[in-house]
């Protein structure tokens, strides 16, 4: 069962608690009951040890309790809910007193207790100023952290058998072969016979051209020598 202070408090208030079956319903019986609630499976002698109420601050097992010494000069130092506050002996009660803290502030604490101021009565809750009783300190239970919830089991996915792949026959379609037409024969070039030019015409043309050239040369020469 997970630790729940309010659940323990609800079951404790109004009940006569006598865990050790000795000396009736004493204040230490409340812390015995509470310690066994905080640490299931363990008995109070292992958890808080033996002695009067004021002795339990020293006798308690540090494996299970964080011990905080009271510092009256520190106004910000207050016991947390669930701590067991330990009082020293005082006039009229040399044995001291012990109670379980429900809530606290800078003025005092609400505690769940038995016997100390109500001999033979049932467990009850009361507010006490810090100055009312000499405080030795308080014991904070080292509640083990609950184990994380296991991760939900993951169901394996069913293995599916592979479906057979149908074999589709491959049909090769050959394209129709178009016959290549035979090449057409090349047309034979038409031979145009050359008409020969008579040799006498070449001679006449050459003589005329030569005479023109000589006339031009004579004109240029005359100009040069000043006969023009």
Image (cartoon, rainbow, N blue to C red):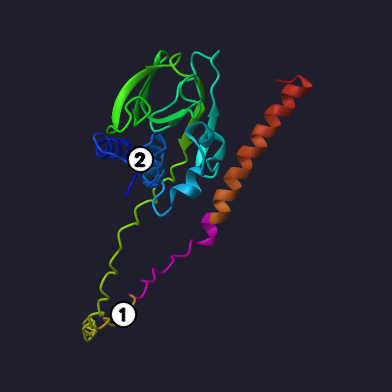
The image quadrant where one finds the C terminus is top right
Distance from label 2 to label 1 (Cα)? Answer: 134 Å
Q: Residues within 10 Å of mark 2 (few under 14, many from 20)?
A: some
Q: Nearer the viewer, mark 2 or mark 1?
A: 2
Q: Is residue 51 above or below residue 80?
A: below
Tell me the SS state at disc 2: loop
User: Which one is nearer the viewer's eye here, 164 or 112?
Assistant: 112
Label of residue 203 in the image: none
Magenta stretch contains residue 149? no
The quarter holding residue 115 reads top left
203 and 194: which one is in front? 194
Span of residues in magenta: 187-201
Q: Which residue is mark 2?
A: 24
Give the main secondary structure of the magenta stretch: loop
Asked if disc 2 and disc 1 are in contact, CB closer than 8 Å, the reply is no
The residue under label 1 is 183
Q: Residue at x 40, y 38 (%)?
A: 31
Rendered location of residue 200, percent (x, y): 54, 58
CA neighbours of label 1 inside 10 A, class few (<14), some (14 to 19), many (20+): few
């Amino acid at each position: 069962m997970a630790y729940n202070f309010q659940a323990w408090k609800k079951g404790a208030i109004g009940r006569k608690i006598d865990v050790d079956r000795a000396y009736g319903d004493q204040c230490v019986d409340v812390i015995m009951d509470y310690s066994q609630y905080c640490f299931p499976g363990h008995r109070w002698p292992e958890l808080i040890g033996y002695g009067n109420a004021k002795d339990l601050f020293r006798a308690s097992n540090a494996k299970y309790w964080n011990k905080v010494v009271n510092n009256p000069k520190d106004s910000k130092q207050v016991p947390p809910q669930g701590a067991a506050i330990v009082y020293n002996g005082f006039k009229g009660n040399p044995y001291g007193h012990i109670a379980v803290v429900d809530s606290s502030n800078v003025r005092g604490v609400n505690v769940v207790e038995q016997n100390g101021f109500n001999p033979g009565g049932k467990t009850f809750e009361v507010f006490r100023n810090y100055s009312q009783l000499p405080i030795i300190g308080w014991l904070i239970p080292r509640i083990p952290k609950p184990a994380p919830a296991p991760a939900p089991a993951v169901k394996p996915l069913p293995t599916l058998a592979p479906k057979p792949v149908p074999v589709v026959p491959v049909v090769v379609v050959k394209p129709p072969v178009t016959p290549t037409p035979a090449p057409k024969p090349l047309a034979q070039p038409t031979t145009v016979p050359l008409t020969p030019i008579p040799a006498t015409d070449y001679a006449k043309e050459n003589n005329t051209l030569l005479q023109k050239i000589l006339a031009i040369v004579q004109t240029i020469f005359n100009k040069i020598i000043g006969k023009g």
